[in-house]
Amino acid sequence: MIEFVKYLPKHVLSALKGLQRHMAMTISSVSAVSVTLLLMALFFVIAGNVENFTQHVEGDLKIHVAIDSIANQDAITAMEKEIAKMQDVAAVHFSSKEEELDALIKESGSVFQRYKDKNPMPNVFIVEVKEASKIPSVTKALNAIDGIEKAEYGGESIQHMIDTFSFIRSSGFIFVLALSLIALFLITNTIKMTIYTRNTELSIMRFVGANNAYIKTPFMMEGMCIGILGAILPIALMCIGYSTLYHMLNGYFLSSMFVMQPLYPFLLQLSAVLVGSGALVGVAGSFLATTKYLRWRR
Amino acid sequence: MIRLENVSKEYKNGVHALRDINLTIEDGEFVYIIGPTGSGKSTLIKLLDGEEIPNSGTVMVENINVGKLKHSKVPVYRRNIGVVFQDFRLLPRMTIFENIAFALEVIGMKKVDIRRRVREVLELVSLQDKAKAFPDELSGGQQQRATIGRAIANHPKVLIADEPTGNLDPQMSAEIMDLLEKINEVEHATIVMVTHDSTIVDRFKKRTICLEEGYVIADIMKGGYLKHE
């Protein structure tokens, strides 16, 4: 370990020298990494935004509970307590029929002003649940409570959307994982080729008594550099592309329901992930390639 | 000291490279190993430098049982032996100085010590004025001298030379032989030299071990190339 640290500057230097000397190899492996990381970045952006959409939609999901108009104030208070005690309920808000009408007027226009004298709106509870998937069961339970006229939520279609989102999310992450494996394979292969071109150098190193770690470290540094260099282009493209899209769409995708991830810290996270996975994949790739090459067969 | 006891080596493809070899080479000896192609010379060298392990018998070099070495210990073991190849194997993009220094960097010698030792070695192999030259700017004989310099830089106890004069004309070969004799004397290294070159073996008389089809067929202390009837 001490030896490793002692030789680190020398290894970094020889890695840079190696990259420079084998320029064509460097360019080919960097571009291979770039393409893979670009795909990975695309999926990261999609997955990240879908995640955001889901959270937003889920956050908006509330159960609208209309209270029977004959229920008096005491009964309402009792009901509120009962609902708040239910297992999957996160919060209960009471909204009087006047507030409901005001909200309707605000949302749909002054036409509804004329109902001011003869308010048709019921008193309601707005119930928030802990998990979107619990909405149907909570709604059912609410409907069973005495004194409640009707409990409703957006219905099947919303549930369906949430399911779709979670499918996109999980398949996106599987895809990213698969892409990382491909990148690993690509880097392993390119580095293997660089090693074959340096066959003599390696065999001399072995003959003069260099141990495997000494031979391997510069190659691993090189792999890391290749990975990091390969991340630059995708990061630049993603930053420019995503911020352009974000500003063009004003931060909403298609409808106000789909809020895009704000530029900061999302792009920073994306860059960190790309640089990190580039470097990691580069190091792992060269490790595998050199280990295979240096394995003793006697 | 190099000691081989009942050493046999058979490759996976069924070739019997060495059969029941018994050999002792004392410290500071200079030994030729001769024999036709396929007689097992290369295999003997591979057993000595730890590249191959014998199927049976023991290979002892400087009291190390080479056949029983763990893989991870082989690089460290190799620091005790220098190897010179027929095709030089110098790193083309390094100067002669750097090529020799490389062997010392790898084993973790201090920079100051490396510089001192490389100068010493360059003087020994008479290449002081070529320190900054690249291998392709040197003649074959000079390149081989540089290789020898690299092989002896870390004071190996054993120097293995695999046909060091194979690519050289007779005059350069003689130069290399003079150099090897000098190293044998100055550095007290045991030298094991594999060769085809009958003129050299006849001219610079040393102990000569003759291999054929994996057997030692002659071990002549006074030297000279073995003539077949």
Image (cartoon, coloured by chain):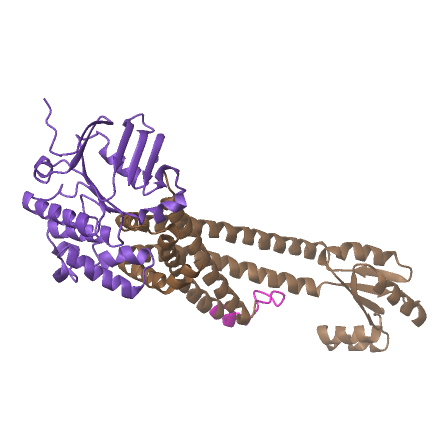
Give the side of residue A14 with respect to residue A104, left or right.
left
Q: Is residue B10 above or below residue A261?
A: above
State the residue at coordinates (10%, 27%).
B227
Give the side of residue B227 with respect to residue A282, left or right.
left
Question: Is residue A252 part of the magenta span, yes or no?
Answer: yes
Q: Main secondary structure of the magenta part?
A: loop
Residue B59 image point, x, y percent: 33, 36
State the residue at coordinates (48%, 56%).
A40
State the residue at coordinates (35%, 39%).
B66
Give the side of residue A116 with respect to residue A130, left or right.
right
Q: Residue furthest top?
A: B229
Q: Is residue A22 visible?
A: no
Q: Which residues are magenta?
A: A244-260
Q: Is residue A125 above or below residue B9?
A: below
- Of all chains in the rendering, the one displayed in purple is B
Give the side of residue A274 with respect to residue B166, left or right.
right
Residue A68 image point, x, y percent: 89, 64
Nearer-the-camera pick, B132 or A36: B132
Quarter where residue A228 is shown: bottom left
Residue A32 image point, x, y percent: 38, 54
- Of all chains in the rendering, the one displayed in brown is A
Q: Is residue A222 above or below residue B69?
A: below
Question: Is residue B37 part of the magenta span, yes or no?
Answer: no
Nearer-the-camera pick, A32 or B148: B148
